[in-house]
Image (cartoon, rainbow, N blue to C red):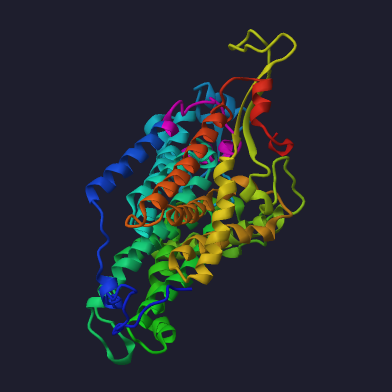
Amino acid sequence: MTTTEEPATSLSVTAEGHPVPTARERFLEVRTGDPWWGWSVTLMVTALAGFLRFWRLGTPAEFAFDETYYAKDGWSLWEHGYARNWTDGANEAILDGRMRPGLQTDDPTMVVHPELGKWLIGAGEQLFGFDPTGWRVASAVVGTLMVLVMVRLVRRLTGSTLLGAVAGLLLCFDGLQFTLSRLALLDVFVAFFLLCAVACLVADRDWTRARMARATWSGAWGPVSGLWWRPWRLAAGVMFGCAVSCKWSALIPLAGFGILVVLWDSGARRALGVRTAFLRSAVVDGLPAFGYLVGVAFLVYVASWGGWLAHADVYEARLSDNAYGPPWGDYVRTDPDGFFPSLVQGLRSLFHYHQDMWSFHSSGLLDATHSYQSKPQGWLFMQRPVVVATEVDIAPGTQGCTAPADSDCIREIVMLGTPVLWWGGVVALLHAAYAWVARRDWRYGVAIVGLLTTWVPFFRYADRPIFSFYAVTILPFTIVAISLLLGRVLGPASGPRRRRAVGATVVGTFVVLVVLHFAWLWPVYTFELLTTPDWLDRIWFRSWI
């Protein structure tokens, strides 16, 4: 779905009698706004997000939820080049600062997610120590930068620094993104790289249309010269590759947005007067787009397994005959001679390893259950959040507990999105679906394609343990939808003053409600001490326990 475009030679006029800009003129139009002020606002919102995410980052001083896997794998990758198994009692020794060689074996561990996210977690451990702060630093950095990219993306989509700042604040004060930014889990990395990839594609759309308006023509094909080099699209391919290198779930957004960008290009060619624009664009733009997005992402993905390939012999010796899939083959018993033969055999073994990973994800969890698993139908409503750390039955008078004698206190971290934001987001997404179809406004397509590709695929796996915090990849597109809806409520800067004032009141009220709700839930986001009655005041539904 593309925006309705006027032909390049349109002679239409507005109601006031002014000529309607042609497609070429609109493609060359530079959005107004003060770049200095735009970046100043961006950095201020980002600094606020960073302060919140780094504050007491090492609390709780324990392995929270799946940190027990990713933090240790990240450290092992940097120390040995591949993920090793750990002995019993390793967690306690690490938390006590008693690292010793005997805590790890030489055997590789069978990991079922790609390695880039764990390399990033391990980088934080190398810089800040193998402790809770160290293994959470990378998440905090990425979670903070995610706010920066959010501001810039919405500012580009709307041409408004104000709406960009609103989008950044909404992301800053979302509880799900906030808690994931303070834990060594993989999902915040996936969400960050996907957001960066989409932001690059939107920048590529603007950049390409300006080049099309200036480019030379090649008969009926339209503008061709100068369009083969697409730096923003190249950057998007790198970012998609990084996202897939953290979790395979990023493959579906890569496919969805890959189709969308071809539609954008064909819409631009149609606006410039090219006949059968879609078919022609599929050749002129679609094939290079496949190379920029899929090809580049594939190369990045393979490169992210560099540590594995360097130690393929270890995996061949220990994991080539395992319970997840068929044996890899007799070739693993030979040692190749030379770099390229070793690389070829390593890639062959990596392929078999991926077959084992796929077997685990497709059939290895069919009989598994988890107390916090949830169905994706409820994710947008925050129906079943995940508690990742908890300390209960804290007696009055201990740890500062001020509960009455017949009660107690509690600490916990709940990965719960700020409900006001998510519930408002459902309304905004419904509006986005309508606006994309009825008004043919391409910007809403960003929100809807993002939603469909990051949410709907999980319905296939609703019968096995999946968790509501996977929805953090949906969040940026929800905020895009909210920002566009708030922009319509706010109205244009040149509109009637009264409407602008009413719109500003509505926008401001929504943002304030989100901030206040986040502040109310702050203790259950940050492991702060609460009396049980105070905790129950924040846990509104039984499914949140």
Q: Magenta span has 319?
A: no
Direction from residue 127 to residue 28 in the image, left or right: left
Residue 194 at least partly seen: no
Direction from residue 208 to residue 324 in the image, left or right: right
Q: Magenta stretch?
A: 52-75
Q: Position of residue 240 (x, y in %)?
A: 44, 60
Q: Which quadrant does the C terminus fall into? A: top right
Q: Position of residue 267 (x, y in %)?
A: 40, 78
Q: Which of 498 and 87 is in front in this view?
A: 498
Direction from residue 119 to residue 27 in the image, left or right: left
Quadrant in which residue 294 is drawn: bottom left
Residue extending farthest to the bottom is 219
Q: Give the residue drawn at x 27%, y 74%.
A: 18
Residue 311 to residue 450: above or below: above
Q: Position of residue 470 (x, y in %)?
A: 58, 49
Q: Nearer the viewer, residue 506 or 105?
A: 506
Q: Give the residue drawn at x 37%, y 63%.
A: 202
Quadrant in which residue 238 is drawn: bottom left
Q: Give the residue drawn at x 28%, y 48%.
A: 38
